[in-house]
Amino acid sequence: MTRKRLDLVLENMTVEDVAAEGNALSHTPDGEVVFIPFAVPGDVVDIRVTKKRKNYMEGRIERMVKPSERRLEPFCSHFGVCGGCRWQPLPYDLQLKAKQQQVYDQLVRIGHLRIPEISPIIPSDRTQFYRNKLEFTASCKRWLLDGEDPDALSPEERCGLGFHVGKFFDKVLDLETCYLQPEPSNAIRRFTKEYAVRHGIPFYNLRENSGVFRSIFVRTTENGGTMAIVCFACDFPGREDMLSAIAGRFPEITSLFYIINSKLNDSISDQTPLLFKGEEAIWEEMEGLRFKIGPKSFFQTNTPQAYKLYSVARDFAALTGSETVYDLYTGTGTIAQFVSRNAAKVVGIEYVPEAIEDAKVNAAANGISNCEFFAGDMKDVLDGAFIAGHGHPDVIILDPPRAGIHPDVAKVILAARPARIVYVSCNPASQARDLALFSEHYEIVAVQPVDMFPHTAHVENVCKLKLID
């Protein structure tokens, strides 16, 4: 059954403001809210309504009647199709204003939390080429652009290597130039695609789980380290030649891995990366500390902004040198080691065992002896017995995934009664929900947003909580 197309166009609508999830909003003459992507406040547009809900509508720009005086020309040729960097037409100062408002809305208007005045958001020094990690997916049936006839394209021309489009798991947009990651990222992606096409290596079919070439990850560091991880659905006779060609073309790749992934999804968290050439890891440096980054390591994807984020977390922790600090969801122990010189002891807990091994290696490499790291599910590891065995936390730092923390984790934290909690979040909505769990015994005394991802609606936020009883 096909979904009926709404035959409704709203003419000469003025875009009024930026809304959540990267959209903008307008109001009909009757006061109904309409959300539209890729719009800038001040645009006058005709809107094709695509969804009609009880309290709002969704649509897309059918015709630009008059562009806003503040509208910028998108710098990426893939804008509007890729789905990423959807705020390119929006001046950066308006992006920051919208993110600041998003934090306020989630904590106060929706979360009903009592907070102090939110500090001005910390902007990103780079608004292009700021990411240190990207994953490019291979597909034998790439996304077709307007005007392309699939019957007129050869199988080779149908191959693509790039990003998933919108909500389509099996649609991949073939990229020419991406402005997210510095070189040699684009060059590695282009060469790898061209090599696979030229040598007849079948690109993956995401619907049928067939083919050979699946994806490639590229990781880079501020000091010039580059890692590439090539993923195949199965081993094949030309695998070594392909990897040798990549290594030969890009001597700057200091770590080249491959993965044989035959399962139905692209996640590599349960896969074994095999080193083909070079070092087993690349290293990032921050304030004199070195951090090992392996194929599956978690590290904040905007390194200069990560430094600012961690600096905020350390300032909020207000350590004097005598405290025991728990760093929950520690990843590779970056924040733990960042605050260790100001603490008596730091205890880090993380779900991914490989990340904990990296954290231990990092601590040893940095000569840090007052950090302990433990692997396991947070709600299973962190309990009263663990705290009794490893020391009462004076300060707890939280940096959980987007979903936030488990209620059982909140109960243990409340029972431990640390003097301060520093909550770092990439999702102010789940952060607001979790902060409400602490509101009876803690007050929020500082809020600091940080922009990690320019041209997107995502925002990082740090809250400082102080015990009030």
Image (spheres, rainbow, N blue to C red):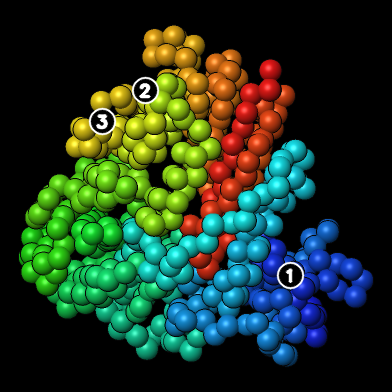
Mark 3 vs 1: CB contact within 8 A? no
The disc, 3 or 1, on the residue closer to the chain's N-terminal end is: 1
Residue furthest out toward the right: 30
Q: Is residue 250 left or right of residue 133?
A: left
Q: Which class describes the residues within 10 Å of circle 1: few (<14), some (14-19), or many (20+)? A: some
Task: Tell which of 325 and 292 is nearer to you.
Answer: 325
Eyeballing the image, is 156 above or below 208?
A: below
Eyeballing the image, is 286 above or below 464?
A: below
Q: Residue 127 location, x and y as percent?
A: 46, 69
Give residue 332's quadrant in the image: top left
Eyeballing the image, is 336 above or below 447?
A: above
Under tag 2, what secondary structure? strand
C-alpha gap between disc 2 and disc 3:
10 Å
What residue is disc 3 on? 368
- Kind of residue at disc 1: Asp
What residue is disc 2 on? 345
What residue is disc 1 on? 17
Q: Residue 358 location, x and y as percent?
A: 25, 37
What's the residue at 38%, 69% (across, down)? Answer: 129
C-alpha gap between disc 1 and disc 2:
47 Å
Q: Is residue 129 in sight in this rendering? A: yes
The disc, 1 or 2, on the residue closer to the chain's N-terminal end is: 1
What's the residue at 9%, 55% (across, down)? Answer: 277
- Kind of residue at disc 2: Lys
Under tag 3, what secondary structure? loop
Q: Which class describes the residues within 10 Å of circle 2: few (<14), some (14-19), or many (20+)? A: many
Q: Residue 139 location, x and y as percent?
A: 34, 67
Q: Is residue 95 left or right of residue 286?
A: right
Q: Nearer the viewer, mark 3 or mark 1?
A: 3
Q: Nearer the viewer, mark 1 or mark 2?
A: 2
